[in-house]
Amino acid sequence: MSGYIDLHIHSTASDGSFRPAELVQQALLLNLEAISLTDHDTVSGYTEAAEAAQGTVLQVIPGIEISTRFRRAVHLLGYGFEPASPVLREVLDWIVDDRDLRNEKICALMRKDGLPVTYPEMKQRFGEIVGRPHFAQLLLEFGLADSVEDAFHRYLEKGCRYYQLRNFLSFETSVETIRKAGGLPVLAHPFQYRLDDAGLRELIRHGLDYGLCGLECRYSGYTEEQCVYLLRLSEEYRLIPTGGSDFHGSSKPEITLGDANVPSAYLDPIRNQSLS
Ligand code: AMP
Ligand code: FE
Ligand code: FE
Ligand code: ZN
């Protein structure tokens, strides 16, 4: 895999199953040249990954994936920002506080059904970012579901017993925040939003108004044809093309690290832009 990178990876800092240092070891075994941990709503895995990669040939780029809203759920990636940025911290704290409120409600519902769940214990076990995938994991362990997917279908999806709404940062604020933190905001997995060509272009143009810099053009499961289409869009709107696997480890076993075959050349504009 020499000559390749993977810029979309989740660790135990959010809902991935491998620790940041383990991901660094796996990336080294695959001869990847650079990785970015893009944990949901947190940068807390960065330090461990950067330290594990020190003295090796692997580059670790600061990264994040923020769940935002623009009419629908839109995921925004950020790269190369200052991990300790106070502007970013403030926004991430808001997200964690909001998650905490929602998660406490889910725990209370589960306790009412006699399940031994306390939120402090979940935070202790899963860390700062506790999400529905962790509740799915518990339901699996209680023998109430056969798989994470099954736990979502039975209990955690909208309309189900343990579904509780959480609030989302707007797409616009998220783009601006990544910029203010010195990073590059990138639209994640553009085919996930069920938009047609006109809809996707509208989303991109709207993002550009707030400082969007990149488009995720290579992604696990996207065909060459789809990648070519996205690359063409990135050229047309002068967006930096990025790519990554969205590796989560055991919770998404169909995806492996390095899956998206992202050439190392993709790194150059990211490095140049985040330095300036
Ligand atoms: P949360 O942000 O805590 O509400 O959890 C959202 C996360 O749950 C998403 O990032 C997905 O990874 C995961 N998720 C959502 N729906 C499903 C589903 N039907 N099956 C498996 N995972 C899901
Ligand atoms: Fe996830
Ligand atoms: Fe995503
Ligand atoms: Zn992701």
Image (cartoon, grey):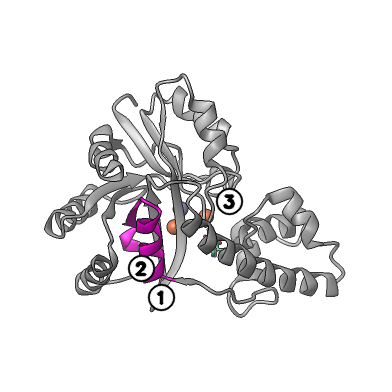
Instruction: Name the residue: 72% across, 71% down.
Output: 106
In the image, the segment drawn in magenta is 170-191
> Can you tell which of label 2 and label 3 is closer to the viewer?
3
Residue closest to the far front: 86
Position of 136 with respect to 25 (left or right) is: right
- Which of the 4 image quarters holds residue 172? bottom left
Q: Residue beneath label 1, please? A: 72
Q: Report crowding for label 2: few under 14, some 14 to 19, many 20 or more residues within 10 A (C-alpha).
A: some
Position of 163 with respect to 178 (left or right) is: right
- In this rendering, the answer to whether 250 lies above or below 209 is above
What amino acid type should be assigned to the residue bearing mark 3? Ser
Q: Do the residues labelled 1 and 2 touch (CB within 8 Å)?
A: yes
Sequence-wise first label, 1 or 3: 3
Q: Is residue 25 visible?
A: no
Quarter of the render that holds ligand 3: bottom left
x and y percentages locating residue 27 in the rendered image: 45, 29
Q: Residue beneath label 3, please? A: 14
Q: Can residue 241 be seen in this view?
A: yes
Q: Report crowding for label 3: few under 14, some 14 to 19, many 20 or more residues within 10 A (C-alpha).
A: many
Instruction: Name the residue: 70% across, 60% down.
Output: 145
Q: Residue 113 carries which label?
A: none
Sequence-wise first label, 1 or 2: 1
What amino acid type should be assigned to the residue bearing mark 1? Arg
* Disc 3, SS: loop
Find the distance from the CA under tag 2 to the CA under tag 3.
22 Å
What amino acid type should be assigned to the residue bearing mark 2? Tyr
Position of 221 with respect to 109 (left or right) is: left
Q: Magenta stretch containing residue 182, yes or no?
A: yes
Q: Residue beneath label 2, please? A: 193
Instruction: Name the residue: 50% across, 72% down.
Output: 168
Ligand 2 is within 8 Å of the C-beta of the residue at disc 3: yes
x and y percentages locating residue 205 in the rendered image: 21, 69
